[in-house]
Image: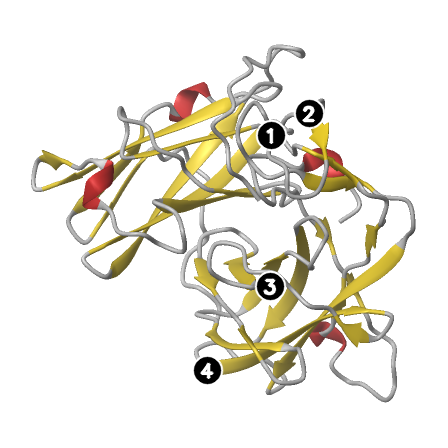
Amino acid sequence: MKNLKNIFLGLTAMTTLAACNNPGNSKNKTANMIAQQDSTHNHEHIYACTMHPEVTGHKGEKCTKCGMELQPIHKADAAKLSVNILASPQPIEAGKSTALSISIKENEKNVALEEVHEMKMHLLVVNEDLSWFDHIHPEEQQDGTYSVKETFPVAGNYLLFTDYKPKGLGGEVAMKKLEVTGTAGATSFELNPKAVATMAGYTVTLINANDLKTNQTQDLQFSVEKNGKKLVESDFQNYLGATAHIVMIGAKDKDFLHIHPVSDKRFPIYAQTNIKKAGIYRMWAQFKIDGQVHTADFTVNVTEGEKGNDEGKHHEHQH
């Protein structure tokens, strides 16, 4: 990741930069299978809170404002990391299982990763128009790579966001694009405002969907109902170390936010974030009840807020 200023909410929050494809190699016809994301990591031992950069300290210490573990922010010696994704078989075909192999390397050696929210790697997959979303977890192999299978529903371009944390370093997110052949979707998807999502009898409402702004710490307030009953936090099961997982992706630049809620008696799902860019965003909130993971999708318009208007809230946990 090149821009640590886009870190938000907690343990490993970052916006993404597009990974560089590796075409033009006559010995390798999988040009659209390999992405390389160069991330500069420095090893100077300076640690700060990702949401409150004025709070600094040493490794293992926590922010005095929000209680989150301090992360290495300013580092001196540059060491390049590359994220490579191989897809097989080629070409990738819609509706058929595709094996994905992901490696994260430094100087051609696989890098050891730390668990974050019960997994060493989170892979968020969307199609380019942001109408389809999947959150999967590649498994570590003996050679240090990570593997998972995915079935892409229709033809088109897909974006793969690899969310990971190298040992001793801050969290990273790398974006990779894949082209999928086959039958295209029947209709085009329109980014119309959407604040209410229904699935499996649940109604999930982003209560403050019309209030989202940049340049301030922003609440995300959700209500969840089933059969006319309003649910509370205790109705939810642990899902990957949190009450829920929230992902936001910008429609224009594909800016990526991975947010984790914190406890709040007013809302069953509640989080805070700091959105850097105004524009249309797609949002997915995932939660688990009775052993079943549910995904609620939203479309929101984030408007420009006044600069310097951060309210100083600090209950965040974001990637």
Spatial separation of the CA atoms under disc 3 and disc 4: 15 Å
Nearer to the camera, 132 or 207: 207
Residue type indicated by callout 4: Lys
Disc 3 packing (10 Å; few <14; some 14–19; many ≥20):
some
Q: Depth-wise, is mark 1 or mark 4 nearer the camera?
A: 1
Residue denoted by label 1? 63
Looking at the image, which residue is at 56% across and 63% down?
121
Q: Earlier in the sequence, mark 1 or mark 2?
A: 2
Looking at the image, which residue is at 82% across and 71% down?
22
Residue denoted by label 2? 55
Residue type indicated by callout 1: Cys
Residue type indicated by callout 3: Asn
Whether residue 99 is situated above or below residue 297 in the rendered picture: below
- Image quadrant holding the C terminus, namely top right
Position of 78 compared to 216: left or right? right
The residue positioned farthest toward the right in the image shown:
77
Disc 2 packing (10 Å; few <14; some 14–19; many ≥20):
some
Q: Depth-wise, is mark 3 or mark 1 nearer the camera?
A: 1
Residue denoted by label 4? 96
Spatial separation of the CA atoms under disc 2 and disc 3: 41 Å
Q: Secondary structure at mark 4?
A: loop
Are discs 1 and 2 less than 8 Å apart at CB? yes
Spatial separation of the CA atoms under disc 3 and disc 1: 40 Å
Q: Secondary structure at mark 2?
A: loop
Residue denoted by label 3? 157
